[in-house]
Image: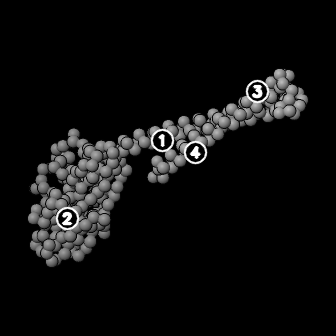
Amino acid sequence: MSGYTPLRSDVVHWFSRALSGLLVFVATFALGVTLFALGGAFGFYAWVIGTPLSLADMSSIAVAGGTLFLGAATALLTLSTRTAAAEARDEARVNRAAGRALLDLSFDKDVPTLWSTDVGFARVMVVNQGPAMAQHVVVTLEGIEPHNPMLAARYQVPNGPVRSGTHVLPSTLQWKGHDKRRNLEVVCDVNPRAREYFDVLDWVWRDNLPWVLFWIDEWREAFELGFNFDGKQPPSPLALDTEYSLHISASASNADRVERVFKLKAVASEPHFDFRLL
């Protein structure tokens, strides 16, 4: 952030206007003195306020006044040029700000769209708090700590070997209701003060063990199944009483990237799973 504020800009503009007014006054005064002295030097009058002035005096006054006028005029021109440049920068900054979006990630257990113990899913919500539409919004699972459970997942390929998961993070998360494999032309744009949802994971308690399925777009690549594979994504086993940190980011073509940490933990007692967003 630049630290630029409208208040500071107003103060700078007020100071520039005040200084410009002072320079105009000084230049006008210097020009008047110069013209008066030149008139005396050419003999139009020989005294000022009863004091006789020589030709040399008038010439010196004319030179001093001319020098002061040129200095004030030069300073005024320089200040005007800098003021115009500053105003152009301010206008460009305002125009850029008006065309920017401001993204944030959130998760709330009280919002049924984000959390369901019956179905077993968790989502994050992307909110655009900026003045402009957020263009081409992408939400990414950057990494999982202390380790990626997908590496322990297994998939039985029909008429083939059992394949283990491999590390493909970071990978984009699926936009709710949109599978990138079938919606390649769909781009997520978020209007100002609007929101969209992105699937993070599904969970299930099975055989007295916790399992999760991460909704990353590259899960087929994680098991080397090919882009056109139509089977279901295999779940990944979780270690009990281990808190996982899912680093999730949101970005747009006209917004700064924001990253939050999604906490996941599974325990033996019901309801088994707990989630929170930092």
Query: Looking at numbered disc 1 in the image, what kind of residue is underneath it?
Result: Asp
Could you say where residue 17 lies in the image, as x and y percent from the top left? 57, 40
Calculate the distance from the C-alpha at mark 3 to the C-alpha at mark 4. 30 Å
Query: Looking at numbered disc 4 in the image, what kind of residue is underneath it?
Result: Phe
Q: Nearer the viewer, residue 10 or 245?
A: 10
Give the mark toward the camera: 1 or 3: 3
- Which mark is first along the chain, 3 or 1? 3
Residue under label 2, please give it. 109
Report the residue at 41% width, 40% height from top.
Answer: 95
- Which mark is first along the chain, 1 or 2? 1
- In the picture, the disc for residue 35 is 3
- Residue 210 vertical placement versus 72 (above, below): below
- Which mark is first along the chain, 2 or 4? 4
Q: Which corner quadrant of the image does residue 246 belong to?
A: bottom left
Residue under label 1, please give it. 90
Q: Which corner quadrant of the image does residue 150 belong to?
A: bottom left
Calculate the distance from the C-alpha at mark 1 to the C-alpha at mark 4. 16 Å
Look at the image and tell me whether residue 149 can be seen.
Answer: yes
Q: Secondary structure at mark 4?
A: helix
Report the residue at 48% width, 41% height from top.
Answer: 90
Report the residue at 61% width, 38% height from top.
Answer: 20
- Residue 124 vertical placement versus 242 (above, below): above
Q: Secondary structure at mark 2?
A: loop
Residue under label 4, please give it. 15
